[in-house]
Amino acid sequence: MSDFRIRKTRWADDREALAGIRRTVFIDEQHVPEDMEWDEHDDDSVHFLAEDPAGQALGCVRLLPSGQISRLSVLLERRTEGIGRALLDAAIAEARAQGLREIFLHAQTHATSFYEAAGFLVDGGIFVEAGIPHRLMVKTLDPQ
Ligand SMILES: CC(C)(COP(=O)(O)OP(=O)(O)OC[C@H]1O[C@@H](n2cnc3c(N)ncnc32)[C@H](O)[C@@H]1OP(=O)(O)O)[C@@H](O)C(=O)NCCC(=O)NCCS
């Protein structure tokens, strides 16, 4: 049984928690090079944090102004509880609220079926980013 909540935030307000999740998942677990993990998009993005009832960070995601969703990550010990999907849904809802008509992401190939379940479609072939195979996936948003 999972107990968590999703909170919208900014990099400047929750940098420590957001960076902590991403360091654990992408740098430590997936061996993404440190200089590729941290980029210029964090300040301009809308971020979401998943937290347990005590306020401990469990996962995060960000939405760039371009419509790209990225850095979706959930701590290994809290996966398959619906946290990743809840974070993704929050980012999609934010994109709709911003009036974006199309959103996209670079999906690690192991996760394409996860994103397909949320309505994303694969567009094109496999490419390598940060040493990990990815595919471009896109989703069209109907006007509200
Ligand atoms: C991908 C990730 C964010 C999913 O988070 P999660 O909290 O485990 O996902 P959820 O529990 O919300 O899963 C929702 C559904 O997707 C399925 N799912 C989860 N991860 C999946 C994966 N990698 N491939 C296929 N299906 C997956 C779940 O089984 C679940 O299915 P159900 O609704 O039928 O039960 C998480 O595995 C993760 O952080 N992985 C490491 C970082 C990473 O690879 N991020 C993606 C970058 S593109």
Image: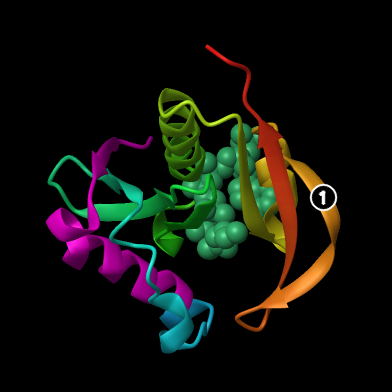
- Horizontally, residue 2 falls left or right of residue 135, namely left
- Horizontally, residue 6 falls left or right of residue 89, namely left
Classify 101 as above or below 116: above
Q: Which residue occupies the extreme top position in the image?
A: 144
Count of numbered labels shown in the rendering: 1
Classify 75 as above or below 55: below
Residue 109 place in picture, x, y as percent: 74, 62
Residue position marked by numbered label 1 in the rendering: 123
Q: Amino acid at mark 1?
A: Asp
- Horizontally, residue 144 falls left or right of residue 78, namely right
- Horizontally, residue 43 falls left or right of residue 116, namely left
**Element type where label 1 sits in the image:** strand
Instruction: Give whichever of 2, 46 is nearer the camera.
Output: 46
Indicate yes or no whether the magenta region holds residue 143: no
Tell me where residue 135 sits by quadrant: bottom right
Image: magenta residue range: 1-26
Residue 61 place in picture, x, y as percent: 41, 51
Q: Which residue occupies the extreme right position in the image?
A: 125
Q: Residue at x 18, y 67 (%)?
A: 16
Classify 109 as above or below 86: below
Q: Residue at x 37, y 71 (%)?
A: 40
Which quadrant does the N terminus fall into?
A: top left
Instruction: State whether residue 80 appears in this view.
Output: no
Q: Residue at x 52, y 85 (%)?
A: 31
Q: Main secondary structure of the magenta part?
A: helix
